[in-house]
Image (spheres, rainbow, N blue to C red):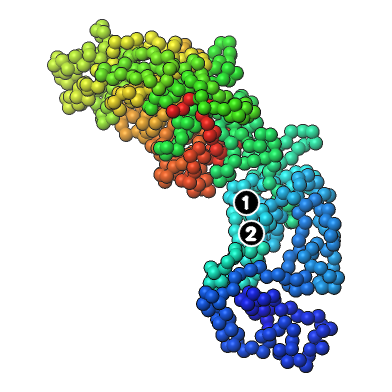
Amino acid sequence: MKYEDADILAFISNKTKPTSAPEKDASSHKNAGPEEVPGNKTKDLEPKDLEKDLLTEASGPDSLPAFEEFPVSSAETPIETYPQIPLDDGSNTGSNTGFSAVSGKDELPFEAFDDYGFETTGFTSSLDEAFGIVTTGIEPLEITHSGATITGYIASARRSEIRLGTYVVVPYEGGEKLFARVGKLQYRQEFAVDDATEIHSRRMLNARASPINEADYKFLACLDPLCILYRKKADSALTRRMADRIPRPNTPILPVTDRLEVQTGLNIPEEGVFLGHLSVGGELVKTHSEPETVAYYLRNDYLMGDPLIFRHMLVCGSTGTGKTFLSKNILRQFMTEDNRYRLRNSQDKARKNPCLVIMDPQDEYSQIFEDNETLTEEDKFRFESENVTYGRVQSTKAFVAKVEGQKYPGDKSRAEQVEFTIPFSLVEHNSWLIAAAGMSELQYIGLEVLLGDFFKSGAPHTYQNFISHIENEGTRSYYVDSNRIHESSYDGIVRRVSSRFFSKVFDRDATPITGVLDKIFKPGQISVFPTEYISSPRIRDLIVLTIMSLIVDNKLNTTGIDAIKETPIILALDEAHRYLSKANGEHARLIISRFADAARQGRKEALGLFLITQDPQDIDDTVIKQINTKLILNLNNDAAISSLKVPKEYERRIPYLKKGQMIIHSPDNSDIVEILGLSNCVVRHR
């Protein structure tokens, strides 16, 4: 009988596998009949009889014995049994053959060999923690300039701990370590068994015990090398270089237990602006360090160039994924006393605290003025241990635009409120503030001609005076008859700018915004512009675009208002897609061009954009290209995901991110990683 047939019979009948008797015993049975051969009850069965026997045993649910692991005595251990290589420290006190499952002196005709001496290779981690070993039994080990093939066999006891994205280290001799990430997982059969049969499936489904014996399968993890960790000298700092060495076969694969190794391996700064904690598959990465979690910081110093906030940030996610919660936690980190930035054009090169300007469509950010009363002492201790800034910012103010027929309730925060109005004089250099979205190129050119002549006149430069001027029949005849503006274009301009909503916002009875700029743009202050109370989307957009244009114009021009020019500014723009969308007309192209310039020059002008949106695909590409750091929460829109241009393996994970879980893509800060945000808000959030 073939060995495979014996395997099948043992499996079906729940009996141990027959093994060949030693050669010296075989002669004593050479004249015996089939029934007299020990352990071989099917020796003379014909194939048809064997098939009938198998089907009889397998028919009917009552006739199916439970699947159990078969006890195999040491004398019956098949020759395919793999040696058990010790994964502790090499101090195995048993036989040095390594075949600990086999007993007896003469049962296996193999030469004895010495145990692997792991202690001689410089491994310092406890091998009891090893996930498994690097193997060449499946694919050859390989590293090239274009990629690598490194396969690890994972021991059955540790398989539940391995998932896609798990970080591991593989030690080299001499103390260096390969830092890698699990990029693929697969099972392979250990023995040549056809498990795609009716008999096998019925037995598995009717088993009373667990039908899966992990030892019958190879569990393989393919490792993606990220870098090699090393120290130039024993007492020098840990650093990294590209993966240019190949690990030896049978080297242990170890979990990363040192926080410094993770931060160095992923190129994460050890300090900076806190964003969250490193995670894999939504679970925090834990180390043996204290604290055990790995904090993710954004580089915020001048050691490698300008701080990354001036290379701009994007927070994007679907509705309800926690964008505002996360943004509050991050923006609060920038508003500390010791966080100061220098201005290149200032004469004294002094460093100043930033001014945080927030466009707030939901009236939630003025709550930064207040503490989160739900924080416990344990929460605060944890924050302090990882340099997470928490607590109110007392210098938070709400700047409220006065709009006819609209009243700001101001019941969500106790922050100071400052009322202002938008003077029509600001339109002189920003004609697009009153240009409608559907205005043609000829109409836009005509509008600039009309505004230029109006602001040269001696009449008060108010919105009502401008409307009276262009509605005058004499003015119309002057421009149309002289062919300066075509008749149809002139009439179209009048229709579009004579809108009722413009009169509700321009030149109201309040202090002009130009008179409170020194109150808005103060170092260390948070200036919030709520717009939730305004029912008209066009008025909201007008207010936000006015503030944005004030900042951009004064930052980009060689001369400007000192309060803006000489203050580091972080402009947080919620619903950014509404204001930086792809250009659909002449005035829209002008807006995008202006803000693309601001994004490009933000590094030297100390202007950082913090954009928040649920539709990143709608933001113009010229602006998106200037954004260095992207925090991506759950998104289900394929177009939105594609617009972020992250690696494919991360694109597939974005729709499954849970609340607070995000992907961070910041090439100048670290490798792309997954992190979890804080479970508590560092300021009030309701």
Residue situated in front as seen by the camera: 677 or 209: 209
Q: In the rendered image, which residue does mark 2 sit on?
A: 219
Residue in the foreground of this view, choosing between 164 and 670: 164
Q: Which mark is residue 669?
A: none
**CA neighbours of label 2 inside 10 A, class few (<14), some (14 to 19), many (20+):** many
The residue positioned farthest toward the front in the image shown:
62
Q: Distance between the residues labelled 1 and 2?
A: 10 Å
Give the vertical position of 394 relative to 333 (above or below): above
Residue at the image point whose x is 44% and y is 11% from the top: 519
Mark with earlier residue (1, 2): 1
Which residue is rendered at x = 15% and y = 15% of the image? 472
Q: Residue at x 54, y 17 (%)?
A: 353
Residue kind at label 1, given as amino acid type: Ile
Q: Is 352 placed above or below 575 here? A: above
- Residue 189: in sight, yes or no? yes
* Residue 455 seen by the camera: no
Q: Tell me where residue 20 appears, x and y as whole percent.
A: 75, 80
Q: What residue type is labelled 2?
A: Phe
Asked if the residue under mark 2 is in contact with the one under mark 1, i.e. CB atoms within 8 Å, the reply is yes
- Residue 483 location (% of width, % of height): 19, 22
Q: What element carries label 2?
A: strand
Q: State the residue position of label 1.
A: 162
Location of residue 3 by image quarter: bottom right
Seen at 53% across and 72% down, the residue is: 202
Residue 438 vertical placement versus 173 (above, below):
above
| Residue 187 shown left or right of residue 575 in the figure | right
Disc 1 crowd, CA 10 A, few/some/many (<14, 14-19, 20+): some
